[in-house]
Amino acid sequence: MNQKCQSLTAVNSKSAIDYLPVEKLSQLQSDRFRAIVKRAYTNTDLFRKRMDDIQLNPEDIGGIEDITKLPFSVKTDLRETYPFGMFACPMKDVVRLHASSGTTGKPIVVAYTGNDLNIWSSVILRTLAACGVQKNDIIQNAYGYGLFTGGLGLHYGGES
């Protein structure tokens, strides 16, 4: 690891993942991708139906390179399964809901678990650290806190 990378990981040890050797990073990405596909297949009726329709099983996914085999989800899927049909977790695990107003149709509802918020915060923290932001720096969050949830991500990451 070069000196710049060492100094970044000293600021935030969570940034170490960003400096993995390419082979280890690729393996980690593939492992996590397979886990996501299996979770979506197991817990989301629409995703399972779409995969079954094309005779694709989670076990057919070898790694990230197989992303092109997966069926697409589009915005209308969120509306057609309103309100909670695309959730891949039980409602008892949901700690935050974000919803659109529904001015162009049914509202779109997105749920976050505590783990989702922790990952989101960690990713933003890593991004800020990579930009040189340090613990005592002041961050101005100019994102809105309305329906665009990006402002909250920066908020959580900045607090981390």
Image (cartoon, grey):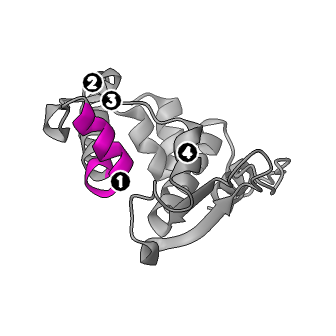
Is 3 displayed left or right of 132 in the figure? left
* Spatial separation of the CA atoms under disc 1 and disc 3: 14 Å
Q: Foreground mark, 1 or 2?
A: 1
* Spatial separation of the CA atoms under disc 2 and disc 4: 27 Å
Is 58 displayed left or right of 130 in the figure? left
* Spatial separation of the CA atoms under disc 2 and disc 3: 7 Å
Q: Earlier in the sequence, mark 3 or mark 4?
A: 3
Q: Foreground mark, 2 or 4?
A: 2
* Spatial separation of the CA atoms under disc 3 and disc 4: 29 Å
Q: Amino acid type of disc 2?
A: Asp
- Residue 24 numbered tag: none
Q: Quadrant of residue 104?
A: top right
Q: Position of residue 2 (x, y in %)?
A: 44, 28
Which residue has dot 1 on it? 44
Magenta region includes residue 22 = no
Q: Which residue is more in the foreground, 83 or 32?
A: 83
Magenta region includes residue 49 = yes
Residue drawn at 59 percent across, 69 percent down: 96
Residue drawn at 17 percent across, 37 percent down: 57
Which residue has dot 3 on it? 70
Magenta region, residue range: 40-53
* Spatial separation of the CA atoms under disc 4 and disc 1: 30 Å
Q: Foreground mark, 2 or 3?
A: 3
* Spatial separation of the CA atoms under disc 1 and disc 2: 19 Å
Which residue has dot 2 on it? 66
Q: Foreground mark, 3 or 4?
A: 3
